[in-house]
Image (cartoon, helix red, strand yellow):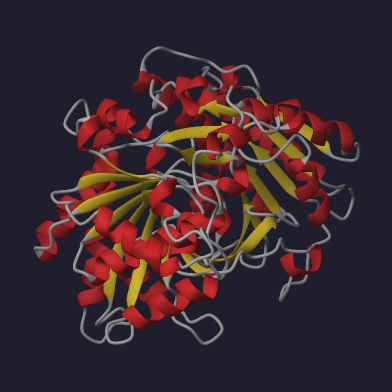
């Protein structure tokens, strides 16, 4: 594994860029025609880097109308998240859902008398910082739908999987995971991690240009990909007695992508939040020059792109602001099977001795008596919530198959059972809070278990990661909902978040 310091030694220092500089640039471009980023989030964990933005789990034009017109602190939102959950769908379903959402968003923006009337929309395809997901399918469908509805062609697809808060960085066109603990300071190419072996979305290349070629099956040759390396992102760095100048980086980025046409893939090196802000200024400049861009990104891109400050982690008091917490126990639901989740679950169960642990046996869910088994599980959870927190997790034995479609079917069966447990529990004895661990798990729990249609992302529960949603309607209104990605945090993180919210831990 290379050392991060050695890899970075070949590049300039980062340019310090305040979020306000980006926000002012975005505001100037939106003065005559307001612009909103519509973020199609393939699981709900993309919201963990932002604060005070609307999130939808349904996408009728009326839902967009609510989101476009919902003011927070007297301001129209710069971005709206739509929970697509497409990482749990097969390609045909994922494509159809992307098309439907884009069409409905554009309809809402074009509707006379609606909150979205007169808006200019840009689209973000938010996906995984470890490169799993339907690429290039989703940006392809978004670009084709925009062209079909508005006649506007997409010049470039900007691919930014980096998530520095969670240790995912791109340097020299290669995407890495930062080490932790004894491996701190070391970089592992992402293709050498467990995520590259994903049954549905596995891949072989860590070099982003080659990843694009691999996933596009050669439609985009690696040599055709525009790479914005740190020499370009940090072109405005201080050197030879000349002060740092973000406008130099912005011009260099816009110049580098000037030739993009017909959805040319554009990948960007990112190591820090300043790099993301430099990229945001460059993309703003490119769009001012007339470039039509679509974004395929990891979680923190939107925060930087709209010039939002990094929100400090929410306190326990802030998590319940405006609501009176229930005396019931909280519900912690764990569905993810990645290694870090299993370790976090182990720490939580060891430290939280007052919590009741309920394991959902996946083999029984796939058996003949699944319904009666679910009835028994719900009864156990409801009874336990009267005494304190309940940890519901799927059995850690992962049932694998070489068939990607069958893997998705099993995942859906398990997720449907988890949703049923949460929904029936909510309507019988509402919990104090709900934490959902894992992307598909947290998506299904939000949309179907808690029946959240409209929510507000309030901010992170840990620095840069783990999102708190406030449901604004439905049976879960007033119950803090925590979206916790399967692949983020250290071994203590799940216990730390639970401790903040619990009255028995």
Would residue 442 be found to the left or right of residue 380 on screen?
left
How many marks overall?
0
Q: Is residue 333 above or below residue 16?
A: above
Would residue 326 be found to the left or right of residue 219 on screen?
right
Which residue is painted at 75% across and 36% down in the image?
380
Quick one: 126 or 15, which is closer to the camera?
15
Which residue is painted at 57% across and 66% down in the image?
51
Tell which residue pokes out farthest to the top in this image. 402
Q: Is residue 119 above or below residue 179?
A: below
Give the quarter of the figure containing the N terminus: top right
Which residue is painted at 58% across and 69% down in the image?
309
Quick one: 29 or 52, which is closer to the camera?
29
Residue 428 lies, in percent from the top left, at 68, 52
Quadrant position of residue 319:
bottom right
Which residue is painted at 84% across and 60% down in the image?
327
Residue 191 lies, in percent from the top left, at 46, 23
Q: Is residue 405 above or below residue 418?
A: above
Asked if one can make out residue 316 in the rendered structure from this viewpoint, the answer is yes
Quadrant position of residue 153:
bottom left
Would residue 141 be found to the left or right of residue 377 on screen?
left
Residue 59 lies, in percent from the top left, at 34, 61
Residue 173 lies, in percent from the top left, at 40, 36
Asked if one can make out residue 41 in the rendered structure from this viewpoint, the answer is no
Tell which residue pokes out farthest to the front in this image. 240
Would residue 257 be found to the left or right of residue 201 on screen?
left
Quick one: 159 or 99, which is closer to the camera?
159
């Amino acid at each position: 594994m290379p050392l991060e310091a050695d890899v970075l030694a070949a590049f300039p220092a980062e340019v310090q860029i305040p979020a306000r500089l980006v926000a002012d640039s975005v505001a100037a471009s939106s003065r005559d025609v307001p612009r909103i980023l519509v973020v199609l989030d393939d699981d709900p964990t993309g919201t963990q880097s932002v604060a005070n933005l609307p999130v939808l789990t349904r996408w009728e034009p009326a839902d967009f109308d609510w989101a476009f017109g919902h003011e927070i602190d007297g301001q129209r939102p710069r971005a709206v998240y739509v929970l697509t959950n497409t990482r749990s769908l097969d390609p045909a379903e994922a494509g159809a859902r992307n098309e439907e959402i884009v069409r409905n968003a554009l309809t809402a923006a074009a509707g006379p008398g609606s909150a979205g009337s007169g808006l200019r929309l840009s689209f973000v395809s938010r996906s995984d910082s470890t490169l799993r997901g339907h690429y290039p399918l989703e940006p392809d469908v978004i670009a084709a739908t925009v062209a079909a509805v508005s006649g506007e062609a997409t010049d470039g697809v900007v691919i930014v999987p980096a998530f520095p808060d969670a240790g995912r960085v791109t340097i020299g066109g290669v995407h890495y995971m930062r080490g932790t603990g004894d491996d701190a300071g070391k970089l592992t190419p992402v293709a050498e991690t467990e995520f590259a072996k994903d049954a549905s979305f596995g891949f072989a290349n860590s070099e982003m240009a080659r990843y694009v070629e691999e996933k596009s099956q050669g439609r985009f040759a690696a040599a055709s990909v525009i790479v914005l390396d740190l020499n370009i992102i940090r072109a405005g760095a201080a050197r030879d007695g000349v002060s740092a100048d973000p406008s130099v980086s912005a011009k260099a980025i816009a110049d580098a992508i000037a030739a993009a046409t017909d959805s040319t893939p554009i990948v960007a090196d990112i190591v820090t939040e300043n790099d993301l802000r430099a990229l945001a200024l460059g993309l703003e400049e490119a769009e001012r020059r007339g470039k039509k861009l679509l974004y395929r990104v990891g979680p923190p891109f939107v925060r930087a792109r709209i010039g939002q400050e990094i929100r400090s982690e929410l306190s326990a008091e802030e998590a319940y602001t405006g609501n009176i917490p229930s005396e019931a126990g909280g519900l912690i639901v764990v569905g993810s099977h990645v290694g870090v989740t299993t370790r976090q679950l182990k720490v939580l169960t060891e430290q939280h001795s007052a919590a009741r642990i309920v394991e959902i046996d996946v083999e029984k869910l796939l058996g003949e008596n699944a319904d009666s088994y679910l009835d028994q599980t719900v009864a156990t959870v409801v009874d336990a919530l009267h005494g304190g927190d309940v940890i519901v997790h799927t059995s850690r034995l992962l049932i694998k198959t070489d068939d990607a479609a069958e893997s998705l079917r099993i995942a859906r069966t398990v997720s449907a059972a988890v949703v049923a447990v949460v929904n029936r529990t909510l309507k019988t004895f509402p919990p104090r809070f709900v934490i959902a661990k894992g992307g598909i798990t947290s998506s299904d729990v939000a949309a179907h278990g808690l029946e959240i249609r409209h929510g507000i992302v309030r901010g992170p529960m840990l620095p840069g990661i783990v999102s708190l949603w406030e449901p604004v309607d439905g049976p879960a209104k007033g119950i803090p909902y925590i979206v916790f990605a399967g692949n983020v945090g250290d071994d203590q993180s799940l216990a730390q978040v639970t401790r903040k919210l619990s009255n028995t831990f």
